[in-house]
Amino acid sequence: MGFFKKIFSKEKKEKLDNGLQKTKEGVWGKIARAVAGKSKIDDDVLDNLEEAFITSDVGVDTTLKIIDRIQERVARDKYVGSDELNSLLCEEISEMLAKSGEEELDDFEIKKTGEPYVIMVVGVNGVGKTTTIGKLAAQYKKAGNKVVLGAADTFRAAAIEQLDIWGERVGVPVVKQKMGSDPAAVAFDTLSSAKAQGADVVIIDTAGRLHNKIGLMNELTKIKNVMKRVVPDAPQEILLVLDGSTGQNAFEQARQFVAATEVNALAITKLDGTAKGGVVIGISDQFKIPVKYIGIGEGIDDLQIFRPDEFVKSLFLTK
């Protein structure tokens, strides 16, 4: 288990390419205009490239970092033709992206420790949080893991019902209480039940609201502390779900949640319906938190483990 890294299959690559098509077309068009009529990368190309990245929601700070890296590379290599620009971008941006440190594992595989691997999922309502939890459950189950879900978003009855529907669809148990119950109590019951069942993976949904950051911070801290009574290392993963189609708004959500809790993994959803996929590059670079999952379609299998190298190749290379 996990000894050899799975090869990125042709099917997964095709799904990734298709899911990023709108972003690719947007970025490609802007890069093509940046180098139009140029035989080498000069200051004009770099200025146009800067504009292309900023308007692709990569973000100003990350864009400037990319331009600096390209400038250094051009100066070092003396002459770099404009036809080499895409390969150059692939190399430099791949090096910038935060790595998860779990690339030696197969897709949705976990290291068995005798305790459940607990994922606490945070994010505002509407970003695809509960849908992402359902897809995660399906993928982890498909990989041979026993999965339990916890409906700790007790703020909305609809959230409990939606998670219940996903549990039935995927065929995994959902631990829940009535609306208005203590979220920490739900998390405690979920981990206790999961441990008794010998579950491998536990995924805990939490309330998706940001109107009171101090209240949110206190609630999430309480949930974490209560879970540690059952599984001392829990939660091993605090996963922030962001909607990639919102562009710069996703940056602001990331800032607020990173301030509210110890986020250590990101899932960026809805990349298939937007030209703003560049936000993945900016968020990964700015927050130094690895993007672990990306959503590139409606299907259950359209949630992929994020591979920076493959993502960047899909955006910038024609083959």
Image (cartoon, rainbow, N blue to C red):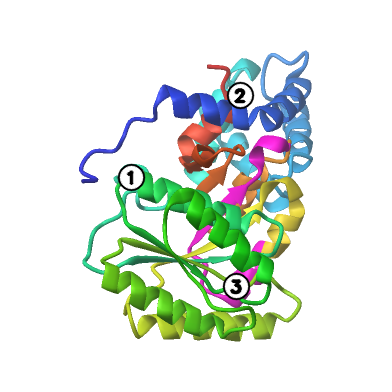
Residue kind at label 2, given as amino acid type: Leu
Query: Are discs 3 and 1 less than 8 Å apart at CB?
Result: no
Q: Is residue 37 above or below residue 304?
A: above
The residue nearer to you, when weighing 285 against 119, is 119
Compare marks 3 and 2 and give the one earlier in the sequence.
Answer: 2
Percent of width and height locating residue 142: 36, 44
Q: Which residue has dot 1 on it?
A: 143
Q: Which residue has dot 3 on it?
A: 153
Graded by Cα atoms within 10 Å as few (under 14), some (14 to 19) or many (20 or more), the crowding at tag 2 reads: some
Q: Closer to the camera: disc 3 or disc 2?
A: 3
Percent of width and height locating residue 39: 69, 14
Q: Which residue has dot 2 on it?
A: 85
Residue kind at label 1, given as amino acid type: Ala
Q: Which residues are magenta?
A: 254-274
Q: Quadrant of residue 7?
A: top left
Helix, strand or loop status at disc 3: loop
Residue kind at label 3, given as amino acid type: Asp
Graded by Cα atoms within 10 Å as few (under 14), some (14 to 19) or many (20 or more), the crowding at tag 1 reads: some
Q: Does residue 179 appear left or right of residue 266 in this picture?
A: right
**Residue 265 highlighted magenta (yes or no):** yes
Q: Is residue 190 above or below residue 247?
A: below
Visible residue check, residue 98: no
The residue nearer to you, when weighing 239 against 307, is 239
Query: Are discs 1 and 2 less than 8 Å apart at CB?
Result: no
The residue nearer to you, when weighing 237 against 309, is 237
Q: Residue at x 69, y 32 (%)?
A: 23
Q: Quadrant of residue 63?
A: top right
Measure how far apart labels 1 and 2 are at the Cα level. 38 Å
Helix, strand or loop status at disc 1: loop
Q: Residue at x 61, y 46 (%)?
A: 280
